[in-house]
Image (cartoon, helix red, strand yellow):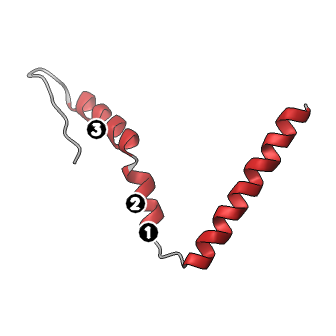
């Protein structure tokens, strides 16, 4: 649950900025995007392996430069 505390004279823009910051920190949007579509376990394994390959390739490029 995201809770925003405002002072008496705070503007709507300040409240919106605080809300956006807390939503980003909590990872709520990332979780919503992840749950938007069901991913079968086999597809999840393939996605995870592909991400690991990308990270590995990226790390080797950085270390060789």
Secondary structure of the residue carrying numbered label 2: helix
Between residues 30 and 11, which one lies in front from this camera angle?
A: 30
Where is residue 60? Give x, y as percent: 85, 42
Report which quarter residue 17 is drawn in.
Answer: top left
Q: Is residue 9 above or below residue 53?
A: above
Disc 1 secondary structure class: loop
Q: Nearer the viewer, mark 3 or mark 2?
A: 2
Question: Image point 83% across, 35% down: which residue?
Answer: 62
| Image disc number at residue 32 | 2
Residue that appears at 12% across and 22% down: 7
Task: Please identify the residue farthest to the right as the structure is shown.
Answer: 64
Where residue 36 is drawn, which disc sits there? Answer: 1
Q: Measure the C-alpha gap from mark 3 to mark 1.
A: 22 Å
State the residue in front, 48 or 13.
48
The answer to whether 45 is drawn above or below residue 8 in the figure is: below
Q: Residues within 10 Å of mark 1 (few under 14, many from 20)?
A: few
What residue is at 64 percent from the left and 62 percent from the top?
A: 48
Q: Residue at x 63, y 70 (%)?
A: 45
Read off the residue under disc 3: 19
Relative placement, left or right, of 17 versus 4 is right
What crowding class fits label 3: few (fewer than 14 Cα within 10 Å), some (14-19), or many (20 or more)? some
- Nearer-the-camera pick, 36 or 48: 48
Spot occupied by residue 59 in the image (x, y as percentages of width and height): 79, 41
Q: How many marks overall?
A: 3
Q: Quadrant of the C terminus?
A: top right
Nearer to us in this view, 3 or 46 = 46
State the CA–CA distance, disc 1 to disc 2.
Answer: 6 Å
Which badge, 3 or 1, comes first in the chain's sequence?
3
Residue 47 coordinates in the image, percent (x, y):
65, 66
């Amino acid at each position: 649950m995201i809770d925003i505390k405002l002072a008496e004279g705070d503007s709507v823009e300040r409240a919106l900025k605080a809300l956006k910051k807390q939503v980003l920190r909590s990872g709520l949007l990332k979780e919503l995007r992840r749950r938007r579509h069901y991913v079968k376990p086999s597809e999840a394994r393939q996605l995870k392996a592909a991400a690991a390959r990308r990270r590995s390739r990226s790390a080797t490029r950085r270390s060789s430069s």
